[in-house]
Image (cartoon, coloured by chain):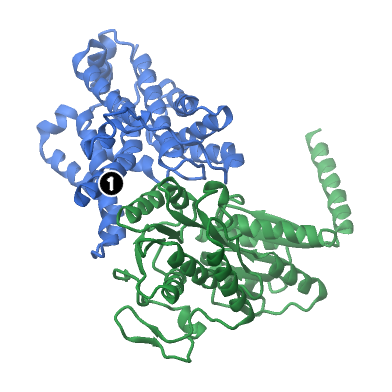
Chain colours: A green, B blue
Amino acid sequence: MRIWLRIAAAAAALVLAAGGAGAQEKLKVGFIYVGPHNDGGWSQRHDVARQEIEKALGDKVETTYVENVSEGPDAERVIEQLARAGNKLIFTTSFGFMNPTLKVAQRFKDVKFEHATGFKQAANVATYNARFYEGRYILGQIAAKMSKTGVAGYIGSFPIPEVVMGINAYALGARSINPDFKIKVVWANTWHDPGKEADAAKVLLDQGADIIAQHTDSPAPLQIAAERGAYGFGQASDMIEFAPKNQLTAIIDNWGPYYIERVKAVLDGTWKSHDVWYGIPEGMVQMAPYTNMPDDVKKMAEETEEKIRTGQLHPFAGPIKKQDGSVAAEAGKTIPDSELLGMNYYVEGVEGDLPK
Amino acid sequence: MADFAIVTAIVLTVITAATPLLLAGIGELVAERAGVLNLGLEGMMAVGAVGGFAGAALTGSTTVGIVSAGLAGLLLAVPFAFLVINLAANQVATGLALTLLGLGASAMFGESFIGKPGLKLPALDIPGLTSIPVVGRIVFGQDALVYISFLLVAAISWFLFRTRAGLMLRAVGDSHDSAHNLGIPVYAVRWAAVLFGGCCAGLGGGYLSLAYTPLWTENMTAGRGWIALALVVFASWLPWRLVVGAYLFGAVAILGFHAQGLGVRVSSQFISMLPYLATIAVLVVISRNKLVLRANTPACLGRPFVPAR
């Protein structure tokens, strides 16, 4: 009796599978996130972009995601499962997924991979990243205009080039308005610990900063700034709900247009591996509405944003001096991308030593 | 005056950092005194955090938030208590499973609260007293959970060492067989201790989402449950030492940030290690001294009680 049941079940499964295969002309696109899909920050922005793909190309594609995947051996297993499940395009959306992505890509030559923020490509692995520092330059300018003490606090996660680059862009923006502006940096040593991030913000405010910026994930620093009547910025997404009267603006990660472009390329058969670094001009980096500031500051911010969009202004255009006074870029020169991606020094205006 | 201001600011920040550790720690201390090692502290704190946030968000009352935080922690402790007490399951394995369960459950129940600002626990404000320079804010300007944490420590200290019931609880933790032979209801005492521990851990988690940072995100406990566990050992199972430990661990973290802000070269990784290093140091010291070890370590800690009929 039991064996017949099993055979019947197997037959039913076969029929279903065949039916599924017949109906399946949609392109399957997979995503893997390092955090929950609604973390209010990094991973959520990728998930919003996934939904935008569904909205734009819903009749041609089918998307799935796996969330909360840690950056280790687990990632390789999950990526491989996505490939086995028939996904022909897979977005791996965290830096730590780099090597697992490449390993799986070697085994699945007909699957295309898109890896965020990495630096290793292959014939079927493309990489993409956003020039968040462009937004941070604008934040710096706003900070210098809005600060009364001339000191800003900056909460870093880990001293990697991506974060150091952001601090420097912020400092350069601020010093373009007020040449004496100072930036105090505190390293929280975590991407996500609201309590610690809040502690760091309190410490910076207690030490005389009156504006807080952060390169960590939670809205806690902004909340503390609001509680103390200071100003702050949102990170990765608009966090205005957490500080309606104290958020000046926020840098928004906007992956949607790029994702749609890449899915279309797979559908057309024109997909090629590449390494792109998009910013404000391409719309990958967006600014939340400029709020809680006088009109002239708002106007300045909008002008700077426009200049970056049209290529008139590059945040890392010389002359730039390092913290120790030596030259980072001479007048008329711009720090090249290759150097930005390995940035391991502070520019003038940032206080303290960069942890090595 | 500026110096006073900074000292006040540091103390205020340390209080916030220490309170969740103290709340979770005092509950665990009682459970361990009764002989039950509950490694699920991190999970119970996480459900407490989401329970507190949800309670306050849904009713608009932070008092309800505090109550629901404690209840959430207590509820999660129920399956643990049943497994390790009635079924004599391995406490270490069950506790670790409880951490995973709590983190997962909190993420599931908290999904709809992500990205929404929460209600903040109001701070006490007594006209005339709170405005006293330096001391006023520190002593008379805290929120309810800070005062509760100190009251709990005082109450537990009195209960454990000054009451008959406390003596019974310690007897159960030191030798459950003797306690059983004396007619002490070992199971009941352990159940009560574990549930109390869960409730306190829940309050500790609730402090995170109601006072520390009024928001909810997944994994917002960020390892504080483990620090609280280490703290109990650091305090060598004595309530007042727990206060010292919690404030010391809190102060180290905050002073580390201050040093960074002032440009003093400190390694933030090293600062993160310090609570655990201090715990190891204390373990070494008390392990060398057999008398101290015997006096305070519950002898039956982690051992299941199976009555011989």
Hey, which residue is sitting farthest top in the picture?
Answer: B183
What x and y, as percent, mark residue A356? 32, 71
Tell me: residue B298, above or below residue B263.
above
State the image quarter where residue A128 is shown: bottom right
The residue carrying mark 1 is B9
The quadrant of the image that shows the N terminus of chain A is: top right
Classify mark 1: helix, strand or loop. helix
Q: Residues within 10 Å of mark 1 (few under 14, many from 20)?
A: some
Q: Is residue A92 left or right of residue A261?
A: left
Tell me: residue A265, above or below residue A187.
below
Q: Is residue A66 left or right of residue B261?
A: right
Can residue A234 be seen at all in this image of the molecule? Answer: yes
In this view, the residue in front, A205 or A162, is A205
The number of callouts visible is 1
What x and y, as percent, mark residue A20? 85, 54
In this view, the residue in front, B144 or B103, is B144
Can residue B93 be seen at all in this image of the molecule? Answer: no
Chain for numbered disc 1: B
What x and y, as percent, mark residue B158? 22, 18
Instruction: Tell me the amino acid under the disc marked 1.
Output: Ala
The residue shown at (33%, 31%) is B146
In this view, the residue in front, B298 or B259, is B259
